Amino acid sequence: MPLPTDYAPLSPDLAASLAALLGDDAISHDPARNAAHAGDWSEAPHVQPPIVLFPRTPGQVAGTLRLCHEHGQPIAVQGGLTGLTGGATPQAGEIVLSLSRLNAIEDFDTVGGTVLVQAGVALEVLQQHVETEGWAFPLDLGARGSCQVGGNAATNAGGNRVIRYGTMRNLVLGLEVALPDGRLLDLLGRVTKNTTGVDLKHLFIGAEGTLGIITRLTLKLSPRATATTVALCALPSFQAATRLVRELRRALPGLSAFELMWQDFMTASCEVSQLRPPFGDPAPVYALVETQGVDDAADRQQLEQTLGQALEHDIVSDVIVAQSLDDNHSLWAYRESVGELLGRLKPFAAFDVAIPVARMGDFVQQVGARLAERYPEPRHLFFGHLGDDNLHLLTGPYPDAADLHAMEAAVYATVGDYGGSISGEHGVGVVKKPFLHHSRSADELTIMRQLKAVFDPRGILNPGRILDGAPEPAR
């Protein structure tokens, strides 16, 4: 069945100008090729774009925006298409600009530990490149093979190691941004400390491409760990998990990940990935723990000693400590089954919320019980990054779209009641836009609209993402 399209043809002047700027080989009119650009991983309805642009340089990105600004032509910006909020899914009347050809690693400072990359570089490509010189780019997430660093910055991605390294915002030293009017704004600083007025780069990190298109990034690296130790713990309760993460932070300076999985998620993970249950008896909650350092034997001994004490104090019910690199991968496999689960749960909702840790256990209990009572057929799977308040919920399938929307509204309202955020690391896009008021005040939303008006007065760049309506002029 063909994907829907709802587009008026480009004006002849704009079409000719884009061809002159980019070249015919950088503009796709092929329906078969363009079908791959009809949407991201979210459940937002896919629409096939008639035209996809593939600029090769930051200058071409800026030139494309200038032309589209002059003609009032809306643009949907696409990176690796791994988002879960519909931010990269084209809407009616939009053409697509793909950053896939901006994939060069331009400069690597092996002394200072920084790297200058174009926005279309895949996260895993960057990770592998810098490791050859003893450095690491510590942002890591399951979509590392497909997601792009420009998109990681545009959504302020978090991933698995925020507990140690912070979010993408903490790893960006500088940016180059193509503005909607065609200016190319150079914010490519290379120093960590810089107090020369407003740090403009932070306006674009997390803005989801609504204020400008990130074209190049200067990123901060960390020395590559030569030893990684992983353990999987069975826990008697969520309260035990909060005690464990506190003890591990105190005892293990190299703690790099603390991933929490509730029992239903573990069961589903084993099913979809054909994994054996890790322990003889199921547990209410599981924690995947990772440390990174330079001495494999010493790090493992320290982790085993700390977890042994947790066992003695009944914080941990059972534990498996990896003894090899293969064991590390095997234990991470329980947590990294999310992609397969998404395929099984369609039509689904994928919640990425932030809840104060002190209230997270109550939130899971309340929301889980309500969903199970009202929607007994779908599965409701909780997991998250306890070290940074980030909680995920996968729930589906929901054949009835009305049920799906009602369920989302109820969950996000509860997030607001708990003083949380409706988005921890995936952004807002179009999927979460109706619920943004649960996390942002009216004054905050007004200022965000005014910023949109400053940078994109004609509203051509990722329109309808995060906020509805035309940009709001400053008063």
Image (cartoon, rainbow, N blue to C red):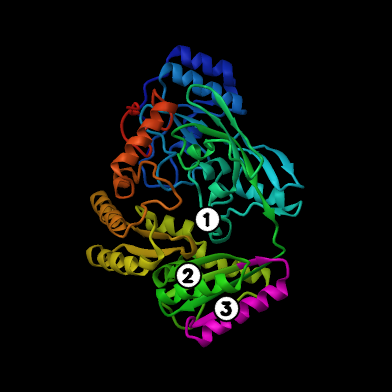
Q: Amino acid at mark 1?
A: Gly
Q: Position of residue 457 (x, y in %)?
A: 39, 24
Q: Amino acid at mark 2?
A: Cys
The residue carrying mark 3 is: 320
Q: Which residue lies at the image location 34% right of the left edge and 26% below the top edge? A: 473
User: Residue 159 shows which numbered tag?
Assistant: 1
Q: Is residue 71 left or right of residue 148?
A: left
Looking at marks 1 and 2 on the same chain, the residue that comes earlier in the sequence is marked by 1
Q: Which residue lies at the image location 39% right of the left edge and 45% below the top edge? A: 428
Looking at marks 1 and 3 on the same chain, the residue that comes earlier in the sequence is marked by 1
Q: Residue furthest top?
A: 13
Start and end of the magenta stretch?
291-320
Q: Quarter of the image containing the C terminus? A: top left
Look at the numbered discs 2 and 3 and tell me whether their residues touch, using CB distance below 8 Å.
no
Q: Which residue lies at the image location 36% right of the left edge and 36% below the top edge? A: 447
Q: Position of residue 237 (x, y in %)?
A: 40, 77
Q: Residue furthest bottom?
A: 312
